Amino acid sequence: MTRETFYVAMTRGREENIAYVAVDKPDPAHDGPHPGDNTGATARSVLFGVLQHVGADLSAHETSTVEQDAWASIAQLAAEYETLAAAAQHDRWAALIRSSGLSVDDADDVIASPAFGALTAELRRAEANQHDVETLLPRLVRARGFGDADDIAAVLQYRVAKATARPSGSGRSRNAPRLIAGLIPEATGTVPSEMRQALTERRDLIGTRADALLDIALTEKHGWITKLGVQPKQARAAQAWRNAARTIAAYRDRYGVTGPAPLGVPAETETQKLDAARAPTALDRAQNLAQAEQPDQEHARRNAPQHVRPSL
């Protein structure tokens, strides 16, 4: 359904307008899955898709602008980055699986599993969090058996995610995660040179896009940026505030958040939920930095010399 058709349907009721969104699926034995199916669809995500589906004809200029914006978006660039990273490191992760302590048959099953891509993405995320995956994965393999597991790759993904939810280290010694625009785990380790160049180009494009979106939001005083508080004047705090705001700008662009709420509605997809765990931290950071400077500004205002107009 297009947004125009949905608008008509939702504005014709005299008493009320109610939309019923069907998210159930046919019996798989009767009608198998289709390539475009979204098994994680919810009523909210379906309606979001409808609102993004414009049916009205666009002018040539509008079409060009929309296409350029879509291909330059962080959603597109992040998808390209993660696809390239998966391809570039496939052999590395396969070798790590084979040397992790699994039997030959189990290792073959993991590499052939539909969950292998999710497992390698989790390993890349763990490495971006400064964990040593070369020693971590064998330890997780030894931790417990897989006798009752239907999919060893899925089990390993869960174990890696649970063990590496936080960056390595503790307290002040905790290592900062290597994230692009504060969200996307950077592909580290050995990568073929031509793939490394492609990854670097997209990493830089993501950072440039996030900076541009933040600058636009600041210049035009968008609703979401005002909720972060005023950018501090002290240089170090100002840079920290900007880094946090940049992460939020990247999150909004990646997941199509357009309203005044900085992070939009709650995350629904698994990928978004991972990013949504970082974005609120950035939001709190920006707000705390802005609030920390307010007492200093208020103190300076109260103690500033008062200019009294002389009487005539």
Image: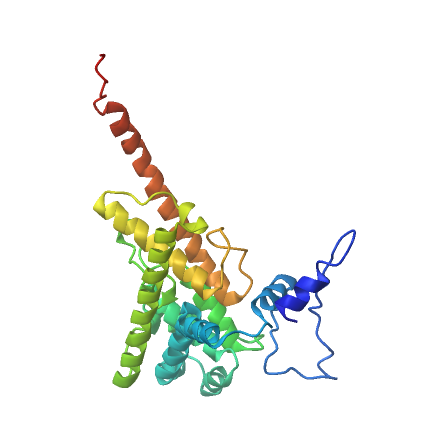
181 lies left or right of 28: left
The percent position of residue 31, horizontal first and vertical second, equals 72, 84
Q: Residue at x 59, y 68 (%)?
A: 49
Q: Residue at x 49, y 77 (%)?
A: 153
The percent position of residue 110, horizontal first and vertical second, equals 48, 82
**Residue 141 makes an appearance in the image:** no
**Residue 104 makes an appearance in the image:** yes
The percent position of residue 129, horizontal first and vertical second, equals 34, 63
In the rendered image, which quarter contains the N terminus? bottom right
143 lies left or right of 20: left
Q: Residue furthest top?
A: 312
181 lies left or right of 271: left
Q: Is residue 305 above or below residue 130?
A: above
Q: Is residue 265 above or below residue 21?
A: above
Q: Is residue 265 above or below residue 95?
A: above
Please state which of residues 222 and 297 is positioned toward the viewer in this rendering.
222
In the rendered image, which quarter contains the C terminus? top left
